[in-house]
Image (tube, grey):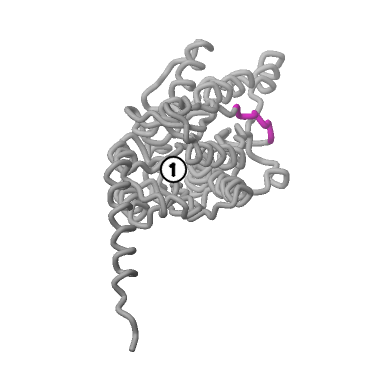
Amino acid sequence: MKKPLIPQIRKKRRIAKLEARSMAVNGRSPVLQQSRMLFLLITDITNPFYTALARGAEDAARKSGYSMIMGNSDENQEMEKAYVDTILAIRVDGVLMVPAGDASLPHLDALRRHNVPFVLLDREVPGVDSDIVLGDSKESGRTLVEHLASLGHRRIAMINGSNDVSSARLRLEGYREALTLNDLLIEKQYILETTLEPRSNLAEIEYWLCAMSSPPTAIVAGNNALALQVIRALAKRGKSVPDDVSLVCFDDLGPYPEIDTFMTVISRQAYQFGYIGTQLLIERIQDRSSPPQPLRKVVLPGEMIVRRSVADLTCSRSLGKSS
């Protein structure tokens, strides 16, 4: 006859009570804290920048003995919320997030309420204090416009993501500042604020290009996906880069920039965004100090890479003067 399982049942009850007491204090089970799993939530896995970022994050996680789970929000707040709900259900150790925009605040608050450590990548969210890895978006925006102006461009347009996204706001600020510094007019018709959702704005871009009373000689694209959409829209009108309009953008168009020798870009350290962000997250997870270590902000500078997508208008003007 088997012995009754009362001792085992009592032991399980004691463990359950201890875990419940711990969760009441800090919102997390000490057992579940050791899952060794991290979650990376990005906005567009088809974008080569985020592909490289994800690789950096995974490499850093693996090096420290963690596994990485990944989700893709498609720049959509509802999808982002659904992923955060999933994250809270599976109880990962920490989260790396590229927020979809300023409206991500309640999602990040939910992580904080449940004591889930997180690090933001590429974008800030007003009202959220956290470890973060950013690019120098404003300075890079200025650099692109300065390059165009130095080659004689005076009608410079910008297609950009929503102003609800911090990096887009800063890039627009850099664009505006550089125009002012070069005594160029800031014209409303030359600025298009559009969605960053993949391939969802081609018709809008076509209309914008057709509607301008005086077409720009150059366009600054807020990211590589928008640059590709501009190229598609121009092609549908029988126009090309740089013969009809010059084009520059943030981030390389493909995963192998040494092969893509066409687009002039601000190249950002995508791999390092993910790698450093994961390092910060793991350090935050393992931080047992009281009070916790101060929050850290890492800014990674971009590199201007000049290729073949910009026409030099100074040459044509010089020829015009001499003739």
Q: Which residues are drawn in magenta?
A: 301-307
The total of numbered circles placed on residues is 1
Q: Is residue 99 visible?
A: yes
Q: Is residue 276 above or below residue 178?
A: below
Q: Would you say 197 lies left or right of 307 here?
A: left
- Which residue sits at x=50%, y=10%? 183
Residue 238 at least partly seen: no
- Give the position of the N terminus as an image quadrant: bottom left
x and y percentages locating residue 289 in the rendered image? 47, 31
Q: Look at the picture and state if 20 lies above or below 319.
A: below
Rendered position, 116 above or below 5:
above
Identify the amino acid type marked 1. Met
Which quadrant: the C terminus?
Answer: top right
In front of the other: 292 or 263: 292
Q: Position of residue 157 (x, y in %)?
A: 47, 28
What x and y, as percent, mark residue 108?
34, 39
Q: Which residue is mark 1?
A: 97
In the image, taking residue 212 as reference, residue 142 lies left or right, namely right
